[in-house]
Image (tube, rainbow, N blue to C red):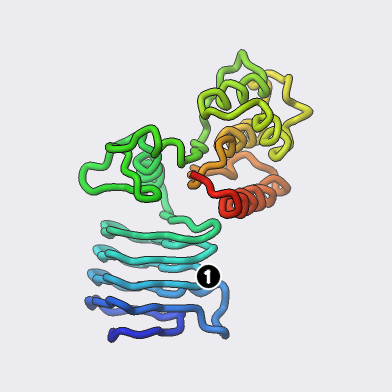
Amino acid sequence: MPPGTYEGPLSIRKPIQVEAEQTRIISSKSASSDEPLLLLETNGATVRGLQLEGSQDGLVVHGDNNQIQDVAITTSKTAVKLENSNRNLVQKLRIRGSAADLEQRGNGAGKSTLIKMVVGISRPTTGTIRVQGLEWRRNREEYARRIGFMPDDFQFSGGMSAWETLCFYSGLRGVGKQRAAEVMDIVGLTEAGQKQVSAFSKGMRQRLLLAQALLARPALLVLDEPTNGLDPYWMESLAGFVFDASIGCRRSGCG
């Protein structure tokens, strides 16, 4: 693929090597929002050096043993999807966008493991993860400050109320009680603030988890199975929370 700008969606269905320095794939005006900028539907291909820019999904991979290296993706949707895929190598991936993410499907695909490495709970065997240029091993405190983490099915202390819980986490994050009250209102738990967390439904616990992740206005929100237990109203609202957080971050300068 020679240097230049191409309109997506594009598809690769042969195990080829794409060395694409200074090459951009952008959204075609006629492209469907359901179509990714680049579909990699093969085994054993190598894609290196691409820039993907658009409003739809960036890169979707169907296949095994592919290598995706040094790829920059700017999108407001999912940056990379690995679907029905195994043993794909992803290196030097740079993601920008209001709510861009990386999606792996299937049990045992490594989603939670990858998330734990990003937030600093687990260490990668090899390689480096950077958030805004920071590495966990070299800048642990500042790295952690940039991230808001919503784990899957976390168990809060049952003896505390929702308000006491958020005040505890606001102290850990170095923000005041006013911010705790703000995020309590954002997730619709103000009226339940004095209720014991042990009496919360699954959906209410998920909203409390989201609230603590939003406390410090982090530059990066990491959400693991965030819609578990949410009813349709709050599932739709979650997307709005994340979008509003990203807009506020860009305006105020998070991190």
Name the residue at 50% across, 58% down: 100
| In front of the other: 105 or 144 | 144
Q: Is residue 99 above or below residue 117?
A: below
Residue at the far front: name it. 252
Where residue 97 sits: x, y (%)?
51, 61
Residue at the far right: name it. 191
- Under mark 1, the amino acid is Gln
Q: The N terminus appears in which quarter of the rendering?
A: bottom left
Where residue 244 sits: x, y (%)?
65, 51
Query: Which residue is identified by label 1?
Result: 56
Name the residue at 56% across, 84% down: 29
Is residue 235 left or right of 124 when viewed as pictured? right
Q: Is residue 180 above or below residue 128?
A: above
Name the residue at 41% across, 78% down: 25
Is residue 21 left or right of 10 when viewed as pictured? left
Where residue 70 sits: x, y (%)?
29, 64
* SS at badge 1: loop
Residue at the far top: name it. 159
Q: How many marks?
A: 1
Q: Is residue 16 above or below residue 123?
A: below
Dividing the picture into quadrants, the one containing residue 185 is top right
| In front of the other: 112 or 251 | 251
- Crowding at dot 1, Cα within 10 Å, few <14 / some 14-19 / many 20+, comes out as many
Name the residue at 42% across, 60% down: 95
Q: Is residue 242 above or below residue 89?
A: above
Residue 108 appears in the figure = no
Residue 204 appears in the figure = yes
Where residue 176 sits: x, y (%)?
62, 27
